[in-house]
Image (cartoon, grey):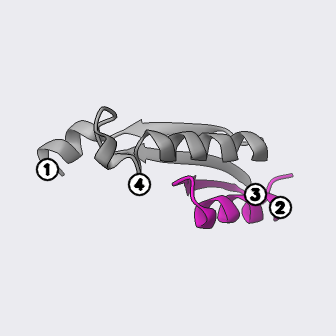
């Protein structure tokens, strides 16, 4: 039986990956989520929340055997909307 369901914002980095792993180990049902906020065709935005980060988060989720979803917020961030 699961301790509960937790959404983990996954950047593909060490901190969020470790948080997901520790929560899973503690018995929680983990769902990984990554926000894509930068244009995918701009290499300058390849770090945080770009395609490379999304791929890294996806790989971590695969290794942890948890579902991973990408939420597309590019237009909202590009237009400065709330």
Q: Which numbered mark, 4 or 1, is in the foreground of this view?
A: 4
Q: Which residues are magenta?
A: 1-26
**Residue 3 percent across, percent down from the top left:** 78, 60
Label located before the other in sequence (4 or 1): 4
Farthest top residue? 41
Q: Residue at x 59, y 46 (%)?
A: 57
Label located before the other in sequence (1 or 2): 2
Q: Mark 1 near mark 2, Cβ–Cβ under 8 Å?
A: no
Residues at marks 1 and 3, CA–CA distance in whole angstroms: 35 Å
Badge 1 is on which residue? 80
Badge 3 is on which residue? 28
Q: Which numbered mark, 1 or 3, is in the foreground of this view?
A: 1
Q: Mark 1 near mark 3, Cβ–Cβ under 8 Å?
A: no
Residues at marks 1 and 2, CA–CA distance in whole angstroms: 38 Å
Residues at marks 2 and 4, CA–CA distance in whole angstroms: 26 Å
Is residue 12 visible in the rendered image? The answer is yes
**Residue 72 magenta-drawn?**
no
């Amino acid at each position: 039986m699961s301790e509960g369901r937790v959404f983990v914002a996954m950047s593909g980095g060490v901190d969020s990956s470790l948080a997901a792993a520790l929560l899973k180990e503690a018995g929680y049902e983990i769902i990984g989520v990554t926000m894509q906020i930068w244009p995918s065709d701009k290499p300058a935005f390849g770090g945080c929340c770009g395609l490379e980060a999304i791929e890294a988060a996806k790989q971590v989720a695969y290794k942890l055997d948890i579902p991973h979803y990408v939420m597309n917020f590019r237009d909202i961030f590009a237009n400065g909307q709330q």
